[in-house]
Amino acid sequence: MKLSAFKVLAIGILGTALGAWAQLGPYVERVYDVRDLMVRPGIVILTPGFLTVVDVDEQVEQAVSARSDLFELRVFGNSIYLRPTKRAGTTDLVVTAGGRVFLLRLVIDEKNFTTYRYRIRYPQQTTDFPTPLPESKTASRGDASVKGDVPFNPLQGEFTLTRAGEGLLLEYRVLNVGRDPVVLDPARLSLKGKDGPFSFRLLWREGAAVPGRLLPNETERGAFLIERGTPPVELTWTATVVGSGRQVVLSQRWGEVK
């Protein structure tokens, strides 16, 4: 009888703890395809004082990070609960679930006041990164285009814009398919709306040996946060080819954002 009473008490305590962790209220939801996360990390924003939940279609077997001092982590079945313990910081979270290993990029953003919920789908339709085109052509994809003052542009870009609280999150991946290094300076990125330029900041970037300087066949990926903004959004990013000094431009426009 004493053992049964102890079990009942333990279950009650666990239920209370789960209830406290799960009181989310309104939240912003983002869906990732697990196959995409096996290629490159997906951004998960953590807000001090708020709880972030990552729901996975398969049972979570393990979730580890090199900077566990930045956040508290609980795993219950198919869900990962995250709560930051610092005001700022960035780290990776390696998750094993359903026999797959995928990567999340945790970004603590003290300027946001929003609860986020992420869903990892097994599987969903995914979009592959475009195959490099012959040098005699320019690259285009949907309403995204790559422009330059000569037919060949050494840069190929992939951009994703999603809602993040009252603002927007811009994730990018840029590949240098040319023969010369290219300087990709965040200061030369322009994001405009119907009322003029948006205010934004760089959250993170990685991939290139020297940030902002892409060698041939190098890829840089990263993310910017527009703290307040609504569509439409027009992106223009001017880069410089090292040696010739030639200017090339990546551009894309979004009429609406989900």
Image (tube, helix red, strand yellow):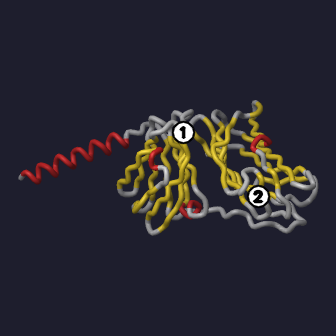
60 vs 234: above or below? below
Q: Position of residue 90 (x, y in %)?
A: 55, 46
Q: Position of residue 138 (x, y in %)?
A: 86, 60
Q: Secondary structure at mark 2?
A: strand
Which residue occupies 87% across, 54% down?
A: 242
Q: Quadrant of residue 16?
A: top left
Callout 1, which amino acid? Ala
110 vs 96: above or below? above
Tell whether 61 sits left or right of 45. Answer: left
Q: Secondary structure at mark 1?
A: strand
Q: Position of residue 126 (x, y in %)?
A: 61, 62
* Of 170 and 109, the residue lying toward us: 109
Callout 2, which amino acid? Arg
Q: Quadrant of residue 78?
A: bottom left
Among numbered discs 2 and 1, the one appearing first in the sequence: 1
Tell whether 75 sits left or right of 90. Answer: left
Tag shown at residue 88:
1
Neighbourhood count class around disc 2 (C-alpha, 10 Å): few under 14, some 14–19, many 20 upward: few
Tell whether 227 sits left or right of 152. Answer: left
Q: In this figure, which residue is indicated by the disc labeled 2? A: 141
Which residue occupies 30% across, 43% down?
A: 17
Cα separation between marks 2 and 1? 35 Å
